[in-house]
Image: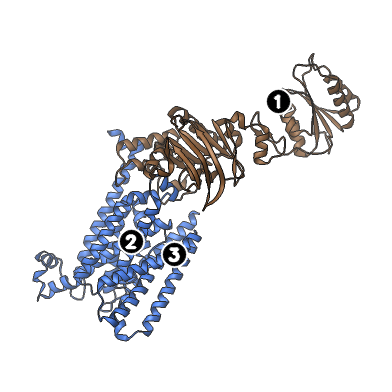
Chain colours: A blue, B brown
Amino acid sequence: MKGREDGFFGQTFRRRLRYELVFIVLIAAFCVITVLNINIGSVPIPVKEILRIIFAGKAQAEGVTQAGIIWKIRLPRILMAAILGDGLSLAGFLLQTFFANPIAGPFVLGISSGAKMVVALTMIYFLKVFNTVSSATLIIAAFIGSLLSTGFILLISRRLRQMSTLLVAGIMVGYICSAVTDFIVTFADDSDIVNLRGWSLGSFSGMSWENVWVALGIIGAASVAVFFMSKPIGAYQLGENYAQSMGINVKLFRVALIILSSVLSACVTAFAGPISFVGIAVPHLIKRCLNTSKPIVVIPASFLGGAVFCMVCDLLARTLFAPTELNISTVTAVFGAPVVITMMIKRHKEK
Amino acid sequence: MAEYYFQTRGMCVGYSGNVLIRDITVDVEKGEIVTLIGPNGSGKSTILKSITKQLQTIAGTVYIDGQDLASLHYRTLATKMSVVLTERMKPELLTCRDIVSTGRYPYTGRLGFLTEEDDEKVKSAMENVHVLELADRDFNAISDGQRQRVLLARAICQEPELIILDEPTSFLDIRHKLELLGILRSMAKENDITVIMSLHEIDLAQKVSDKILCVKGDTIYRYGTPDIVFDEQTISELYELEKGCYDPLFGSVELPRPEGEPQVLVVSSGGRGIPVYRKLQKENIPFCAGILYTNDVDYSVARSLACEVISERPFFPISESALDKALKMVSECRYVIDAGVDIGETNSRIAKVLDAARAAGKLHRETDSIER
């Protein structure tokens, strides 16, 4: 079968090599960043110790300082950063497919802000009435909020097909939701909003294991579902009508896309607050690295890429000006916004 | 119903419940090429969208291979029908091969991996339409003509029994138009694939199609073989052309003729008059042509361009009345142009016309010496 190695099929072979290379780099980056994240902090822990403590298990964490730091603080936090980063980048990828617009993402379209608004309302109400609020409640609230703003954007996008107007609409929705949130916060009791203020700026800190498992369950399931939808997503990239001619029930597929992207961005917002730019920057960078937009490779690579990106940003957020911690959005914006700007300039040139 | 591959019965199409075109009833055999023609906005695309299930039909039924389109699943339909649409797709970072491969969609597994067999089919489809060398180029970086052929390759590798194309020749230059239609033609005949498409070029439609569907107003204006449909009156009425603009014999069209009293008489035969006619038309000088035998090529063009034609039945001697008309024209016109005419036994009287013109000092050999 030497014939397959060159000529018509030679390129396929070279492309596959490129994909493999990107995946190897991403996995390596993931491992390195995980270790670095555990290693660096107010109490540095050497790599040898890290491995010993992790393999020794959670049980011996009681009483031992280093083990406690790893098991109670750093490990849940990096896991959460990885899981939520994955969720954000997949949500962004889905929205970009749906709107056929590379700058769509949960943050720019106002979906994160919608989730934030409903979560704020729920938080204040529940704390007032029941004095407590569970993560399940917050996720449901965030999901409702996401769906609300997604629905609104959908209504607008029916009328306006243009990319720029869609984004303006999204930004406006974001502002309205933020205004409502600010309004509520202004008139809420201080005791109710202590949590809210920290949360609404976006942070991965203070994650419990319970949160990690819930996030892992939801985002993991959604990610698997997205991966198994990569075939219809690939067809949808050619446009709705072509997708239908290939045998896709477009109406059902659109609903599935919207629900999945809402679940993903809602879950992230519920745990870490609104986080900007990850959803746009990561899928874009991944597509450039792979030099394709085929979902079958872009989806798993975005999954890994989102995790790496958020872990790096979180590491910077907590170490750059230690002991003061930055908001995660501050860091993601610094890295994400330039990506988006170069992307827009490039597209403009192509036209 | 088995003998027809595609049928519609009383199909009404339109948008959101408003009927645009009603009562479409056509029968198409397997391997036939059916072309929809009609003026802009007449609803050709609406009909095509309805038979590809992008639009719901408002009434009536569509049968594909004996099955009701409404009850066919998208999945099943995808193995029977593929499409080439007018909408411009702008995929990101996809090569032409990626685009063509999507045609294999209905046949691949859950995750859409291509088997070796699929790869070979993609390759042969691309070979078929001569785009193999574009396989690894970015789809956004190729020309319109190439893009259209890549999309056709995509449609072919979906292995359909029926291909629907919405204005496949727009954006293409004449060579690519001919090439594309040639491919469709051989595909239809060799592989027995039925083709339904819309075209703007009526001359090409006449030459490539087995059946023509004329769409105008809210009904099907006419449906049948090109011989039946392409007569002068049907085409003129379909597109609301002025009389004489369309020549059914060659399927050609002409710009409107200069109107008014003829100022020039053109004497010619055997096609030598045509360049003179065109020149006079561009200068907007009304002219008369004659005496022409009705089987002369000059006659076909003169009918469209001259404001008056003096004619004679083929192989008959020129009659007294035709000669009188021509002589009268010589005296009325300011110029007479001899574009070249063969004078034999039957048409010897043409010499008299030329003599009269020479005597009046009106005879010229070229149009250049003419002033408005």
Residue A194 % position (x, y): 29, 82
Which numbered dot is residue A153?
3
B230 up-or-down from A166: above or below: above
**Res. A13 image quadrant:** top left
Share a chain, discs 1 and 3?
A: no
What residue is shown at x 40% (from left), y 75% (from top)? A178
Q: Are marks 2 and 3 in contact (CB under 8 Å)?
A: no
A116 up-or-down from B167: above or below: below
**Res. B349 image quadrant:** top right
B79 up-or-down from A60: above or below: above
Residue for badge 2: A89
Residue A291 shows in the view: no
Numbered disc 1: secondary structure: helix
Which numbered dot is residue A146?
none
**Whole-Å distance between the Cαs marked 2 and 3?**
19 Å
Counting residues from the start of the chain, the first of labels 2 and 3 encountered is 2
Residue for badge 1: B297
Q: Residue furthest top?
A: B345
Q: Chain of mark 3?
A: A
Residue B166 % position (x, y): 51, 42
Residue B342 % position (x, y): 77, 19
Q: Residue furthest right?
A: B360
**Whole-Å distance between the Cαs marked 1 and 3?**
64 Å
Q: Specify the amino acid type for callout 3.
A: Ile
- Which is more toward the observer, A65 or B43? B43
Mark 3, other Cα within 10 Å: few <14 / some 14–19 / many ≥20: some
Share a chain, discs 2 and 1?
A: no
**Whole-Å distance between the Cαs marked 2 and 1?**
69 Å
